[in-house]
Image (cartoon, rainbow, N blue to C red):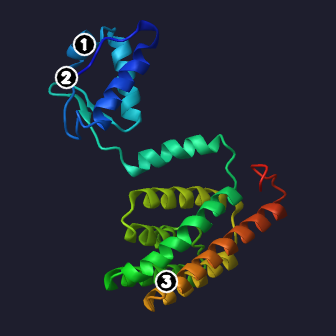
Amino acid sequence: MFEQVRPKKAALEIIGQIRQAILSGQLSPGDRLPSEKDLIIRFGVSKNTMREALRVLEVMGFLTIRQGPGGGAEVMAVDMQTTQDSIANFLHFQNTSITDLSEVRRLVEPYLAGLAAGRLRQGEIDRLAQLNQSCREALARGESIVGAKDEVDFHRTLAHVSENPVLILVTDLVNSLLTDSKHHLQPGLDFSRRVLSAHERILAALRAKDGPAAAQEMRRHVEEVEDQLLELRQQSGQAPTSRRA
């Protein structure tokens, strides 16, 4: 399965070969790699180079490495959090702005809300209602719901109804990045009240199974959040993080 590698790019080539073996299905989650000694012989590298490559694959989420007797490298399914962290690190260096994130939300989230209107089961509607109720109770205690799990889970629930892993990943990633911006800008309770009000309007449309209305209310919500965050940033005197916003 594996071939010897060029000395100057040994670690990178090892990473590439093992990654390709996983992505092509030659190795599956739960499979164990050959022993370290075996891998060193197959790739024709030093122990340090082999360990460096395995550590990188572990950070990437492809492997888990156990130490001691019976230990070794085992193939893992890359989870969503690891994927999000990698993409978020990349986007950090692209100076991604509130406007960039909101543009993606305008494209994706109204579609998801309209789709959910025709797919939501009663249990899922009850779940959305409970999330809104938890947010309402937090506000009654004078607590912000900005970035709170229940507030973010409202959007995650709608994404999961699509059963589309790409849409789920994009929605979760964008909302996580936007939550970072919210925490930095520290919007007040009035912002939280507007968010909850928008979620209530969206839920009402979903209960009525009115896809166009649900999409319209979600788009209105996304645009309101964008406008309020941009206004807060302007008031704080913060410079835009990209040319576009």
Q: Secondary structure at mark 2?
A: loop
In the image, what residue type sits under mark 3?
A: Gly
User: In this rendering, is residue 179 above or below 114?
Assistant: above
Image mark for residue 34: 2
Image mark for residue 42: 1
- In the rendered structure, are the residues bearing label 1 and label 3 in contact, judged by CB atoms less than 8 Å apart? no
Mark 3 sits on what residue?
211
Q: Is residue 9 left or right of residue 240?
A: left
In the image, what residue type sits under mark 2?
A: Pro
In the image, what residue type sits under mark 1?
A: Arg
User: In this rendering, is residue 176 above or below 29?
Assistant: below
- In the rendered structure, are the residues bearing label 2 and label 3 in contact, judged by CB atoms less than 8 Å apart? no
Q: Nearer the viewer, residue 205 or 83?
A: 205
**Rendered residue at 73%/71% (across/down):** 228
User: In this rendering, is residue 194 above or below 62?
Assistant: below
Q: Is residue 104 left or right of residue 121?
A: right
Q: Quadrant of the N terminus?
A: top left
